[in-house]
Image (cartoon, rainbow, N blue to C red):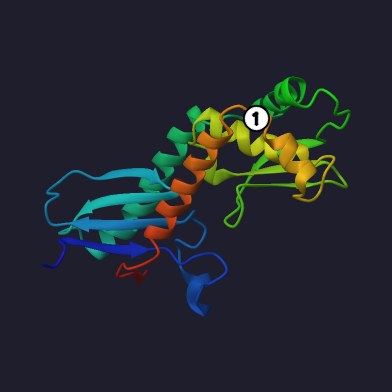
Amino acid sequence: MPSDNSLTRSPIAGNRPPSFKKNPLAHLPEFRVIRSARRKRSIQAFRTNGIIEIHIPAKVSRKQELELIPEMIALVLKREAKSRKSDEELVHMSAELLGAYLPEFSERPASVAWKPMRERWGSCTTLDRTIRISNRLEAAPDYVIRFVLFHELIHLRIPGHGDDFYALLDRMADKERAESFLEGYEAGIASHTLGEEITPI
């Protein structure tokens, strides 16, 4: 039985067609539009697994859809901005984690900031001590953000992922819980890229 939903997805960064530069939606974060014959009037937008979903009635015209997309994404981003942790809060969280779990570390991050990252949850450049956390995790629970941040803090001293690295990582409370969340989160993202009929805008 065919679904009553149709899906439109923004092209993924790094895999854009040549005409993408002319797309008025090219500057927007990744999103998908889901049309439903069951939805009569209401329009909703929220982030799922790092991607903004915009749910609209099937009867909405293409022109209306293109007008709605930036408006609904702006609402989601505004709502997230009110609840997301600032870069300064990430720095404060880093200091707490270092004091609690890595008291022998004299290294301190030069900066900690949210960054658009699609392939990793976080990264640390040991040489200049900069830490970046994927903005896909902005809405994640605190214990998940703390775990990813702790992972990157260890890289301030240890660049690789050897036994010495994992011995330190095991100190983190909620380690297994956070890893389970991230595995499920990644699986949720993958489920939206496989087995769906996708038509680019």
* Closer to us: 131 or 38: 131
Percent coordinates x, y for residue 79 in the rendering: 43, 33
Q: Is residue 199 left or right of residue 179?
A: left
* Closer to us: 23 or 181: 181
Instruction: Answer yes or no: is residue 63 visible.
Output: yes
Q: Residues within 10 Å of mark 1 (few under 14, many from 20)?
A: some
Q: Is residue 155 left or right of residue 62?
A: right
Percent coordinates x, y for residue 28 in the rendering: 48, 55
Instruction: Answer yes or no: is residue 50 visible.
Output: no
Percent coordinates x, y for residue 106 in the rendering: 89, 28
Secondary element type, mark 1: loop
Looking at numbered disc 1 in the image, what kind of residue is underneath it? Met
Percent coordinates x, y for residue 61 in the rendering: 21, 62
* Closer to us: 154 or 44: 154
* Closer to us: 146 or 6: 146
Q: Residue at x 14, y 67 (%)?
A: 2
Quadrant housing the C terminus: bottom left
Q: In this view, does 13 lie to the left or right of 43?
A: right
Tag 1 residue? 172
Q: Which residue is drawn at 27% across and 57% down?
A: 34
- Where residue 173 sits, quadrant-wise, is top right
Vertical relation: 16 (above or below) 145: below
Quadrant housing the N terminus: bottom left
Q: Residue at x 63, y 39 (%)?
A: 148
Q: Which residue is drawn at 11% across and 52% down?
A: 38
- How many marks the image carries: the answer is 1
